[in-house]
Amino acid sequence: MNLSVGIVGLPNVGKSTLFNALLKKQQALAANYPFATIEPNVGIVAVPDERLVKLAEITKDEEKMASLPPLKPATVEFVDIAGLVKGASEGAGLGNKFLSHIREVSVIAHVVRAFEDANIIKEGAVDPKSDYETIVTELILADLQTVNKVLENRKMEPQRKSGAEKLLAVLNEGKPARYAVLTDEEREMVKDLFLLSSKPEVIVLNVSEEQYTPEGIEKAIEEYVKNTGHDRESLVVICAKIESDLAGLSDTEQKEYLESMGLEKSGLERLIQKAYDNLGLMSFLTCGEKEVRAWTIKKGLSAPLAAGEIHTDFIKKFIKAEVVSYSDFVENNGWKGSREKGKARIEGKEYIMHDGDVVEFKIGS
């Protein structure tokens, strides 16, 4: 499945610096992986996954290949949503373009500035809480217009009307649409509204280079939670400047750079993982001579539906799946060893996929 993250933020909060770092990563990725030409405001980057390299090494040895098979990591599409200023819902700045782009993404990443810099001109004070509230207010105002327009139609299904009325009540309280408590029927009837404030979100605290330490990151999170009451699970701390520097380094150099700061993962990696968590996503793995690949699916998906991510025809033609956990696959050096040790299982249509499952699907004609 395609995962897209919309990056939103007020002017001069570090959004463009972060996105430019993503574009550098996209250029590096494009050197090894074919992608279609995309708009300048869209960047596609690989989901970091060290498991793929290990699977490729095992496959090379098992299949007696001269070189490693191609790696095909899962990817995330980042959309730089421009034009957000106060009044965007009424067309200020590039309001209409901003709103149309945000409707298309899977999750919203709110970039807020959490550092002082006298050389950077910024609208308002350095206050990540007000940054976030300004963005969310514009989303809510746009959603109010959408819901009010729907309710002008007096001829609609009762469940659609009651769902829209519940949404209107929540939005009028200044709360995002995702806080509305709807029945399954109501949710189904209003899902075509594509309300902006109903989307999952990640709040990205952009800190200074000096703050970008394990202790500084924890302090930034604690201060934001204290000031806003937000759940810390929705937060990611990055330093857009450092992300920009990392984007120009090799994988080894990136690791050394991060270790020198006491960090295990880059901000980009943590942002992608947070997006995965908030959307309930995971990856299963396939490997062979042609490629070693990670496939993104929803948690709780059955084997036939997971096979459908490879090709939609596989859903109907699914027969069975041979599955080995990643740890067992590595411990037993591939398919042959896993089969000999009884670690390869044959699963049917009811099997629920797990993160890191290494799979071979058996598909009928």
Image (cartoon, rainbow, N blue to C red):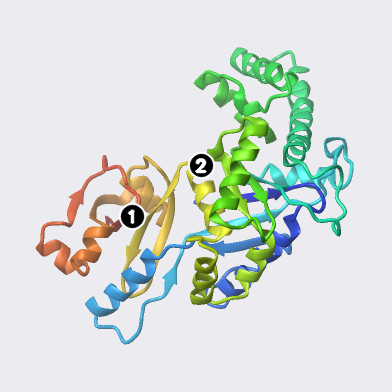
Classify residue 44 by image quadrant: bottom right
Position of 165 with respect to 265 (left or right) is right
Judging depth in this view, the residue of 33 and 109 nearest the camera is 109
The quarter in which the C terminus is drawn is: bottom left
Relative to residue 192, is residue 358 depicted above or below? Answer: below
Residue 154 locus on image (x, y percent)? 74, 13
199 and 322: which is toward the camera: 199
Residue 356 marker: 1
The answer to which quarter of the image holds residue 27 is: bottom right
- 9 horizontally vs 231: left or right: right
* Residue indicated by mark 2: 279
What residue sits 18% from the left and 66% below the top? 332
Task: Report the side of 139 relative to 219 (left or right).
Answer: right
Q: Does residue 311 appear in the picture of this structure?
A: no
**Where residue 267 sits: x, y (%)?**
58, 57
**CA neighbours of label 2 inside 10 A, class few (<14), some (14 to 19), many (20+):** some
- Looking at the rendering, which quadrant does residue 91 occupy? top right
